[in-house]
Image (cartoon, grey):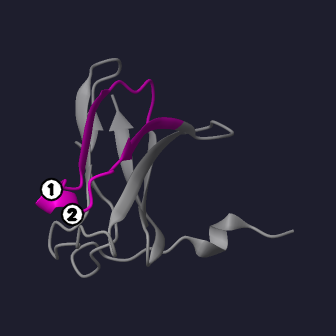
Amino acid sequence: MKSFGKFLQSGDWKGEKHVPVIHAPEKVESGEAFELRITVGDAIGHPNTLEHHIKWFKVFFHGEGDKFPVELTNFTFDAHGELDTTTDYVGATQVKLPKTGTLYAMSYCNIHGVWENTMDITVE
């Protein structure tokens, strides 16, 4: 059986412009909303041209003890230099988590493929 997982790339976002950066607190209160932001290019800017751009971010949460992760959000970027218009690669939403777990973020570059990053988050 073939697996999509072999295509997922990762790295340190400080040295690799394709890795999604997860901006969220390390600890949150149960049931209380917090801002979850996903970006790329925080340390090294990523191009946003018709030829080379980030198309989307996807974010999942896998709670401790859960069998599968759930998709939290999906951000798409459709302006890639048309008429000198660009979009910064930032997606933000408010999230409430019921338990401790792991955030998984993915970004897709039209030239360099799918990149991933994770962050553990504690719910008190």
Query: In this orientation, which residue lies closer to the viewer: 48 or 8?
Result: 48
| Residue 81 numbered mark, or none | 2
Q: Would you name the residue on which mark 1 appears?
A: 85
Measured as percent of width and height from the top left, residue 59 is found at: 43, 45
Q: Is residue 49 left or right of residue 118?
A: left
Label 1 Cα crowd, 10 Å radius (few <14 / some 14-19 / many 20+): few
How many residues crowd around disc 2 within 10 Å: few (fewer than 14), some, or many (20 or more)?
A: some
Q: Is residue 38 above or below residue 84?
A: above
Where residue 52 sits: x, y (%)? 33, 74
Residue 49 in the image: above or below residue 57: below
The image quadrant that residue 28 belongs to is top left
Q: Amino acid at mark 2?
A: Gly
* Image quarter in which the C terminus is found: top left
SS state under label 2: loop
Amino acid type of the residue that numbered disc 1 sits on in the rendered structure:
Thr
Residue 74 as seen in the image, left or right of residue 65? left
Tell me where the magenta segment starts and ends, as one range. 71-100
Q: Residue 92 at x, y = what percent?
A: 24, 38
State if disc 1 and disc 2 touch (CB < 8 Å).
yes
